[in-house]
Image (cartoon, rainbow, N blue to C red):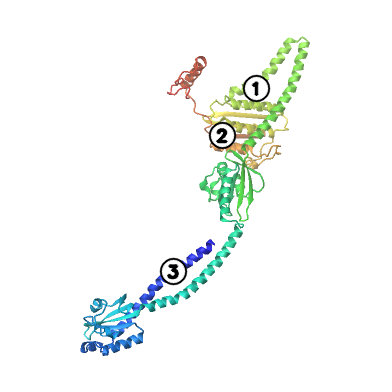
Amino acid sequence: MVQLAIAAGVTALATGMFLAPLSAQLDDQAMRRALVIAQTTAAEPRLDDTLESFRPTRHGPVEHDAERIRAATGAEYVVIMDKQGVRWSHPDPDEIGRHVSTDPSIALSGQEVMQIDEGTLGRSARGKVPLRDENGKVIGAVSVGIAYESVQERLLSTVPQLLAYAGGALAVGALAACLVARRLQRRTHDLAFSDISALLVEREAMLHGIREGFLALDKNGRIRLLNDEAQRLLELRAEDTGRPLDTVLPPGRTTDVLAGRVSGADLLTVSGHRVLVANRMPTDDGGAVITLRDRTELERLGRELDGTRGLIDALRAQDHEHANRLHTLLGLLELGLQEEAVEFVTQAVGVHHATAEQVTERIHDPLLAALLVGKATVATERGASLRLSPRTHLPDRLVDPHSLVTVLGNLVDNALDATSGERDAQLEAEVRADGRTAIVRVSDNGPGVPEERRGEIFTEGWTTKEPPAHGQRGIGLALVRRLAERYGGSAEVGERPGGGAVFTVTVPDALSEELSEACEATLQEAVTDTHTTGPSEGGTRLPDGSTEAAR
């Protein structure tokens, strides 16, 4: 109905816009016709002589010629006047000899006139021309009028035809409106506009309210729809809508998965420091709809579960070993060998203390130290030996220790998996600071990584191991590389002398600026004073002007 109303309105408007200039055009044609008749009359031979030789009478030659021309042309009147504006001819003989009812001065001044005006015979389209003698002198004027009713009749005669055309156009418009309406109904599944509006509002609320990332692409690979969670997970902006996917995301597995160049369900990928699960569903128009789930926490919990299981196995083995040691100690005491018992206990305890002290002496960050102590226990349980490189030294100035914990933990776990089943499995960990750059290196004497596969080993989803019960593999080394690149560093794999693999990760700006000796001494003094006397108001002032409390 709306389309029909629009079509009818447009038709009426077009008809009115056509009639308006048509009326003006008919008026102009009538005035020009009157002017042409007046010019023809003024060109009649001997008319000037007659006008100068006779007086205006009802049956004079001027009246006769004027009436003849009026009858031949269909004009309403043909009036011939002298220079004083007195009529010599008129359709009403009583008007002959009288002064004309309209101003003749323009025509008597030698100019031609076209106008619509009122006279003694009513409204008419008029044409006035000067009447000249053989010397070109103006001796009078000729005024011709076309009845305005005839102009209106011509206009009204065109209206039925015009309305017929308008009706035909309206019928075509109505048919087109019906066809478009039916097509729209099919395309919108017969939903009303109010229903479509409600669906759009509900869709916007749902897309921006769900905790899964949602991404829609058209057939050309441009982003058609992007919800808030997808913006967060992929680090995109709302302004990226409408741009090609390959231009807003860096090259890599994430872009390949979203673009459909990697097929499969529940595909794992790494975006920044997040582990994502992506599913891509093609649409009928050649585009695709992609859902993204953040699996970072799940992967972290799964790895913590693997680590916890390893620690549990190690504790179970230590419990068994501890029971054997207790039995040995009990036997020594029952045999009265007290000195041997003391020596046995001292030796057993000293081994564990030596491992912990060796780590904490070289690595001053408590998180990394605790990680290496735990990994050493797990390695011992799995029949491997984990030792620290002599070059290991890391001060307690890490900016983000959790990132290095992730890097070191993944590299050690990868080395333990690589040496699983190997006799005399050996691992070496090196964590050291080079200025503000942290360098993490883990080597093992496992089978190593072939040179042709070293470019793929840091790719998401690439693995040679069986997946664990809690999920998929191929994420750890990808996370290591992403964390290193996040700080502008790198992750590389090489060959260990004697066989095996060496993983080296460089993390620039991982350590804070080193304090000067004066600052360290003052800070140590402030800490000592705080422990002994309690914190003073405002804190202890350091050499650089700040306070210990603020620092």
Give the mark nearest the N terminus, 3 or 2.
Answer: 3
Q: Amino acid at mark 3?
A: Gly
Question: What's the mark number on residue 506?
Answer: 2
On the image, the x and y values in percent for residue 406 come to 61, 33
On the image, the x and y values in percent for residue 12 come to 47, 67
Give the mark nearest the N terminus, 2 or 1.
Answer: 1
Q: What residue is drawn where x is 48% and y is 65%? A: 9
Other-residue count near label 1 (Cα within 10 Å), few / some / many at <14 / 14–19 / ≥20: some
Marks 2/1: CA distance? 26 Å
Marks 3/2: CA distance? 81 Å
Other-residue count near label 2 (Cα within 10 Å), few / some / many at <14 / 14–19 / ≥20: many
On the image, the x and y values in percent for residue 437 come to 53, 31
On the image, the x and y values in percent for residue 304 come to 65, 32
The residue that mark 3 highlights is: 16
Using the image as rendered, state which of residue 137 and residue 333 is in the foreground.
137
Q: What residue is drawn where x is 50% and y is 74%? A: 164
